[in-house]
Structure formats: structure tokens, C-alpha cells
Image (cartoon, rainbow, N blue to C red):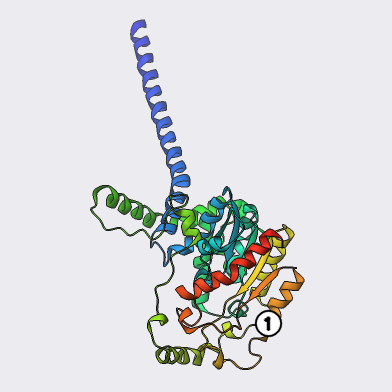
Amino acid sequence: MYKSNIKNLILMRNRDTRATSFITSVFVLFCTMIFLHTSVIPVVVVDSLVSSDLVRSSTYGKTFPALHSLGDYEDGKVIAIGSSIIQYSIDGKCIEDRMETEDVSVFNLGVSGGNPYTEMLQIPAIVKTNPELVIIDLGPNGLWEFYESESLDEYIQFRFSINSIAMDNSDIGEWTELIRERDRQWIAMTDIERFELTQTYSQLGFENILMEYFDEQFDLLEHKKYAPKPNEEGWFDYLKTPNFLAPKYELLNDSETLELIDEKMQSKKYAGVYNPKFSGTLNHLAYEYMLETLTDAGIKVLLVAAPHHPFVYPHLEPNQLDGFNHTINDYTIRYDVSQLNMYWETWENSMFRDRNHLGDYGREYYCERIAPVVDQLISGE
């Protein structure tokens, strides 16, 4: 009887041990899954946003991965930010080659559709990289008043969400005070909110990684890679010289180009991009935040404005762009920054890819013009 009781106790203890062991294993598995979800998924999604067609263009995903990787970049840094106008104007490698200053790299972080309101989010991250100079796109196209537009709201939602996925908590800055209430839901202020936004792209991100793997290992799928992943070979070269648009107007004769621009400008000349305000818009406030934050951190700033196709200017009324002239000059004096205003210059037709973007020849001339200015600012002359 005594031996039987002992045996039963041992069996019960073994069952309890196995049950405890099972529960412990489940708990460990649960913790592992949580860890994998919170650590692996963001990396997979960010890599896919930067290198694939997960969204409309891989350029949209590069801003914060670029800035985080530039924090440890050994050479001096010049960082250019702004809209597609600067995106298709700056060839960092070309500018470097024309500069006398050595060990300074020029990075192009311009983004299609970017406006001061969307681009101000990166300013704290830029300050942390401690660049020698920040080049900011400031043309008439960035000084419009915000208006009711479903497509504009969708763009802001898209950009804020994409940027939030790749941001760190330390990237949150005083720009939050300028965010409209309607847009706050697209900004991740905490790790949990950031993870929730990441989940939106997690399935597509893993599908992209699998397609890339099968293409590399077994050549079973045709998978196009649009850009290097962060810190991959060629990453910094890509940040200097991004993928530029293919020629367009360069392939046409002047009469064909004139017809296209005349048709476009019939409506475009009334839009905000050609009717810049003097002050007080949300975009003005964003510019002022950027300039104040950068200059307070002791970082030099160069405001640049590239010209548009010469066929654009006859459509503009006298004094139509006075808001632009006033703003770039006011900011130059008020914040003690430099400017290179080429907007009113007449460049050759062959230098333009379309109405407001430079082509290959225009980019070369832009490089020739801006390189000595960058050189002088960095050297302190």
C-alpha cells in the first residue's frame, strides 16, 4: 500500500512536470513569435519598401533608412531634401567630382511630390547625422496654401505612414506641433503604433523577400530589384545618384514640346505651384521650422531653386511669383542662410526632361553651377 502511494505520487509529479514544461514551452514560443514579429517584420518591410515596387516608387521608403545609415558615415555629408525637382536635379557623385574639398559626400534625398509639410519630419534625424550642409529645395512649387483635396490627403497619409514605419522614437521632434489633427493618425508616436502601421505591409514584404530568394537561389522567378537595401553594396552610391527619369521632351522637337507645355499651362498657371503665397501657409511654417531647427544646431543651409522649361514663363503674369521672390529672400536674411536662385534663368530647351524637371544635360549643368557654391560653403569661404 505504501509503495503504491509512492508510485502514484511519482506519476502525479511527472504529469505536473510535463504540464508545466508544456506551458513553459508554449510561453517561450509565444515570446519568440512576439520577438520575431516586432524585430524581423519591420526590417523585412523597410527593406522591401526601399528595394522593390511594394509601393509606387522605392524612393518613398528610403528617407529614414538613409538618414539612420548616414549617422555612422565616416566622411563629411551634404544632404539635399525636397520635391521631385531636386530629386531629378542633384547628382551627388557629379557634384563631389567637381568639388575641391575632399572627403565630403553629397546625398540626394529628394522625393516625388514632397512638400515642406511632408519633408519636415526628417529634420531631427538630419540634425543627428551632423551634416556639413543641408540643401533645401525652395521654389514657387513649395509655397502654396493647403486646400481640400482627396488626392492630397491620400498622399499625406501615404508619406506619413511610410516614414513612420522606418522612424525611431528619437526622430520625433517639434514638427509634431504643426501636424494637422486629421493627419495625426498616420504618425506613429510609439513603438506599438509603429508596429501597427508596419503590419499593413508585412504580408507583401514577406512575399517580396521570398520572391527575391527564389530568384537568386533557383532562378525560378523574375524579380526586379529597384534599388539596394540599406547598407547593402551600392547603397551609398544610390543615395548619391538615385534612379533618374528616362528622357521625354529631349526626344521631341521644339514645336512638339511647345504644344505640350502650352496645353498643360492653360490650367497649371492657376494652380498653387505657380501662385506662391508670401507667408502664413502650412508650408511656410514647415520651412520656418526646418530653417530654425537646422541653424540652431549650427548646420549650414543652402536654399536652391531650379529653373523651369523656358516655354513656361510666357504663361505667367507679371508679379505672379512675387510670393516666391519675397520668401526666398526673406528666409535668406532672417535665418542667415545662403541661396542659389536659378529660377529666373533661361536654360536651353535640351536641358529639360519635362515642364519642370531637368534631364541629363540639365543635371550636368546644374552640377556645374552648384558644386562651387557647395565647396565654398563647406570650406567657409
Res 262 seen here: yes
Q: Position of residue 296 (x, y in %)?
A: 74, 60
x 47%, y 56%: residue: 237
Q: Position of residue 355 (x, y in %)?
A: 48, 83
Res 279 seen here: no
x 72%, y 65%: residue: 292
Judged from this view, the residue extending furthest toward the top is 2
Using residue 55 as the reference point, say whether residue 219 is left or right of it. left
Classify 199 as above or below 342: above
Using residue 213 as the reference point, say whether residue 300 is left or right of it. right
Q: Quadrant of the C terminus?
A: bottom right
Residue nearer the viewer, 79 or 373: 373
Q: Position of residue 96 (x, y in %)?
A: 55, 60
Q: Position of residue 136 (x, y in %)?
A: 62, 68
Judged from this view, the residue extending furthest toward the front is 100
Residue nearer the viewer, 227 or 375: 375
Q: Which residue is mark 1?
A: 325
- Please tell me in which quadrant of the rendered image residue 228 appears: bottom left
Mark 1: give few (<14), some (14-19) or many (20+) Cα within 10 Å: some
Identify which amino acid the numbered label 1 is placed on.
Answer: Asn
Using residue 133 as the reference point, say whether residue 98 is left or right of it. left
Using residue 301 as the reference point, say whether residue 205 is left or right of it. left
Q: How many marks?
A: 1
x 40%, y 76%: residue: 247
Residue nearer the viewer, 106 or 286: 106
SS for tag 1? Answer: helix
Residue nearer the viewer, 303 or 185: 303
Q: Quadrant of the N terminus?
A: top left
